[in-house]
Image: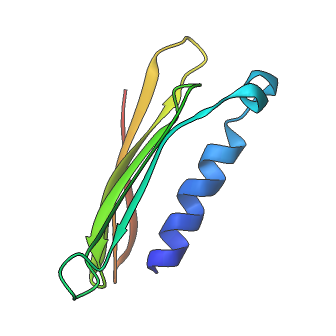
Amino acid sequence: ILLQAFVFVLLVTLASCNEEDFNAVLLKAENHQNLDGAGQFNHETSVSNGIQVKAQGNVNGIQGEYFLPGEDGKQIRVTYTADATGFHPKLDN
């Protein structure tokens, strides 16, 4: 289920791309795994076009958020959890 959540976030990010996004530059990419020996991780990515992804969790679940640039130029924030019960996004606008 954790892999499914990651794939979902990746697909949402890719689906939001336009021609200008092809020139976007990766500003930050951090991935820390097995921080406590029990599968704990955190991940953060930022791109020059305003896309940001942050996630943390362990083998029991993930909590995260991602930001996408809206058509009006404002950031769209999505927070989510993913666990044994599924992927649970919440849109903040």
For the image, the number of numbered tags is 0
Q: Is residue 18 visible?
A: yes
Quadrant (top left/top right/bottom left/bottom right) for the C terminus: top left
Residue 36 or 62: which is nearer the viewer? 36
Task: Determine which quarter of the picture holds residue 56.
Answer: bottom left
Q: Residue furthest top?
A: 72
Q: Is residue 80 visible?
A: no
Q: Is residue 36 above or below residue 25?
A: below
Q: Residue furthest bottom?
A: 38
Q: Is residue 80 above or below residue 92?
A: below
Residue shown at the point (51%, 65%) measured from the top left: 6
Residue 45 or 10: which is nearer the viewer? 45
Residue shown at the point (49%, 68%) measured from the top left: 5
Say left or right for 52 vs 11. Answer: left
Residue shown at the point (55%, 22%) measured from the top left: 70
Residue 12: give x, y in percent of width and height.
61, 48
Residue 24 or 89: which is nearer the viewer? 24
Residue 49: give x, y in percent of width and height.
59, 25
Residue shown at the point (31%, 85%) measured from the top left: 59
Residue 72: give x, y in percent of width and height.
56, 11
Q: Residue furthest left?
A: 36
Residue 80: give x, y in percent of width and height.
34, 55
Q: Is residue 93 above or below residue 91?
A: above
